[in-house]
Image: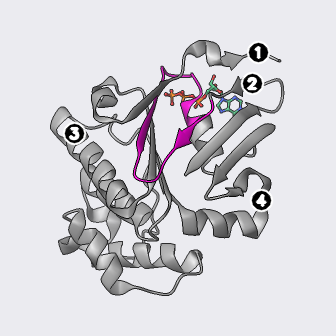
Amino acid sequence: MLKTHDLTYTYAGNGPSFRFPDLSVAPAEACLLLGPSGAGKSTWLHLLAGLLTPVAGSTVLAGTDYARLSGGALDRFRGRNIGLVLQRPYFLQALTVKENLLIARRSAGLAPDKAGALHVLEQLGIAHHADVRPGRLSVGEQQRVTIARALVNRPQLILADEPTSALDNRNAARVSDLLRQRAADLGAALVVVTHDQRLKDQFDAVVELRPSTHQENY
Ligand SMILES: Nc1ncnc2c1ncn2[C@@H]1O[C@H](COP(=O)(O)OP(=O)(O)OP(=O)(O)O)[C@@H](O)[C@H]1O
């Protein structure tokens, strides 16, 4: 269960301030955070991922307020409990697809699990690319590898930033289905941020962020 309360963030140097709506996302529930460009969606997702530290408020997952963790403790918590699908794929290009998944396990302090990594790649229809370097794959295939890597540690929370905005209708529906199915299989809470209105009908809960959420200097 993910719960946030009074989550607030201010960018340094007189940057914009945000106070985000409270969220409560149960295991296997899928929540869509919608909003126009500049409304603060990526900022929100980065707070939920523990990549930004809130000025105030809490982000609680399975009883731990990880907004209060820092350094190695936060990295370990994120690695074990949160799967991230960020806007741009980032891979270790010298390694194969399978090795990129195994590194994700190792950096979270988890035992190697080649069979588990291959199983996730099979579920996403890319097992035949397991021994290929990610740079040789198409954009859509790379996105599925990113999703596979987000799932490989069996996280309690999966966060995705604009996973479909660059895709045509057919592939957007496919990626959205995959994320929701795999999250439900794992019993993970899923939070997707997007301005892609096509996804609206597919999610259990939709929270719309209006530009007015962005508040100057309060
Ligand atoms: N590092 C930063 N320093 C100052 N302001 C920032 C910084 N990063 C983002 N912002 C500002 O915060 C606001 C929200 O940015 P954010 O990227 O969260 O919006 P978004 O809703 O994800 O937009 P998009 O859909 O275009 O990606 C924008 O006005 C942006 O200029």
Q: Earlier in the sequence, mark 4 or mark 3?
A: 4
Q: Amino acid at mark 2?
A: Ser
Residue 173's tag is 3
Neighbor class of circle 2 (other Cα within 10 Å; few <14, some 14-19, many 20+) is: some
How many numbered circles are shown?
Answer: 4
Which image quadrant: the C terminus? top right
The one of 15 and 85 positioned closer to us in this rendering:
85
From the Cβ of disc 1, is ligand 1 less than 8 Å away?
Answer: no
Q: Earlier in the sequence, mark 4 or mark 2?
A: 2
Q: Which residues are magenta?
A: 22-42
Q: Earlier in the sequence, mark 3 or mark 1?
A: 3
Mark 2 sits on what residue?
17
Q: Is residue 10 magenta?
A: no
Q: CA distance from mark 4 to mark 3?
A: 36 Å
Q: What colouring style does the render use? A: one colour
Mark 1 sits on what residue?
216
